[in-house]
Image (cartoon, rainbow, N blue to C red):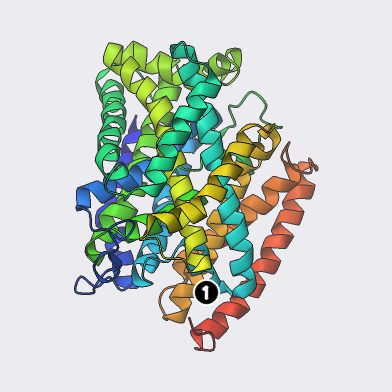
Amino acid sequence: MITFLICLALLIGSYFTYARYLERQFGMDPSAKVPSETMRDGVDYLPLPEWKTFLIQLLNIAGLGPIFGALLGAMFGPVAFLWITLGSIFIGALQDYASGMISLKEGGLSFPEIVGKYMGTTVRQVMRAFTLFLMVLVGAVFMVGPAGILEGFTGLTQSVWVWIILVYYILATLLPIDKIIGRFYPIFGAALFIMAFGILGVLILGPYEIPNLSLAALDNFTANPTGAPIIPMLFITIACGAVSGFHATQSPMMARCVTNERQGRPVFFGAMISEGIIALIWAAIGMAFWGGTDGLVNTLAEHGNNAAWAVETITNTTLGKVGAFLALLGVVVAPITSGDTAFRCARLIAADFMHVEQKQLRKRLMISVPIFLVGVAITFMPFDVIWKYFAWANQVLAAICLWTVTVYLAVRRRRWILAFLPAAFMTFIVSFYIFIAPEGLRLPYYTGLMIGAAITLVIVVVMARYLRLAWQGRIVA
């Protein structure tokens, strides 16, 4: 319990300390005009209340990550608490705040355009294609997943639910952001908080014992420690609850809706820290509910590592009928709220690099129709293998974002080391992972370690030279 409470305090405290420090580094200016004011179009550039932008951002970035990912990551043991806490503060919240604030200062630019501005034309073209495909893939998967769950609760088939969800996605993508997303997301965001804080109350007041961090607790508790080593597997398993490249694609959406640069701290940094708190709570209940990490590992193994089953069992037992309803709401609505914004983000990314304004509906349709056709096509494909690479590709995206933030700070002669170290760390994790992972090259552990370290060293050296040019003013962005 002590470790859990310390980590919880650190996450909350970072909002009042580290976040304020980042405000100074990124030049937060409360008197500056923002895109929702200077570029207002009534569709995407639209001022919204701070509490709405916060809850929308939280739902945009969360999905099922801080719940499912945290439960599966908890199988590694209490070391998961460290990654959730330190990752959320020094990597995830940094990335989310930086991507939001840079977009805010750059007229609401989408993520690939920001990367291209600071990393070069070639990287821009690659990121346009890579990010656009990733958004459509996320949207397609989050049609099929919830549809399968809803089939089990209703008499309608999965294919019917896919088409129902698709219609919703089309409306949420095309209509002004305040019509659907702005009205319903705050409700779903509140439900996510109610479920998490209900579980927190159970942890503190109930009979459950949360494991503390110790040398013994740093052991790998997974069913196959050799096949799933803590480094790098933990850092891919718990993504959204610590750092996720997907977040960087979502922050510009809210950068077009905030009404003051001061709101960057609650909306971007605060949403990520909130997600970290939710992930910490779910990791803790996962370890405590079944009497320890070993119990969690054994129980999930018996149920095919089905995190949805674990969520339903925990909430039904601890929160009763209310918990059962919130669990269903979370398992179904959370991925849908990430899927619709993924498609909306895909439209904005395409519109930005094609230079097509989005005020007119016919122009939104011109871009959205091909995107949805590709998304629907993906739902009919056996994309299980492709989806296995999403977790890895997501963290690759995070590494690229962090390198971009590093250059942004160097150009402005700010403390670029704040992003440099996390960027180097995530580069090592994704390089190491792909060489030893089951969906990767499956090389021996230490072979993958050496290759991953070598790749990271090369990238660090190249980026160090690039940063020197940026610091000297020879790179203008």
- Rendering coords of residue 215 (x, y %): 52, 35
Give the quadrant of residue 75.
top right
Q: Can you name the residue that lies furthest to the front here?
A: 362
Residue 207 visible in the picture: no
Q: Residue at x 58, y 32 (%)?
A: 219
Along the line of sight, which residue is nearer the eye, 62 or 361?
A: 361
Q: Residue at x 42, y 14 (%)?
A: 313
Depicted 263 relative to depicted 278: above or below: below
Q: Is residue 123 left or right of residue 81?
A: right
Q: Is residue 99 left or right of residue 203?
A: right
Q: Secondary structure at mark 1?
A: helix
Give the quadrant of residue 110.
bottom left
Q: Is residue 348 left or right of residue 427?
A: left
Give the quadrant of residue 277.
top left
Residue 304 visible in the picture: yes
- Rendering coords of residue 402 (x, y %): 51, 62
- Rendering coords of residue 263 (x, y %): 24, 59
Along the line of sight, which residue is nearer the eye, 169 or 91?
A: 169
Type of amino acid at the residue the image marks with label 1: Tyr
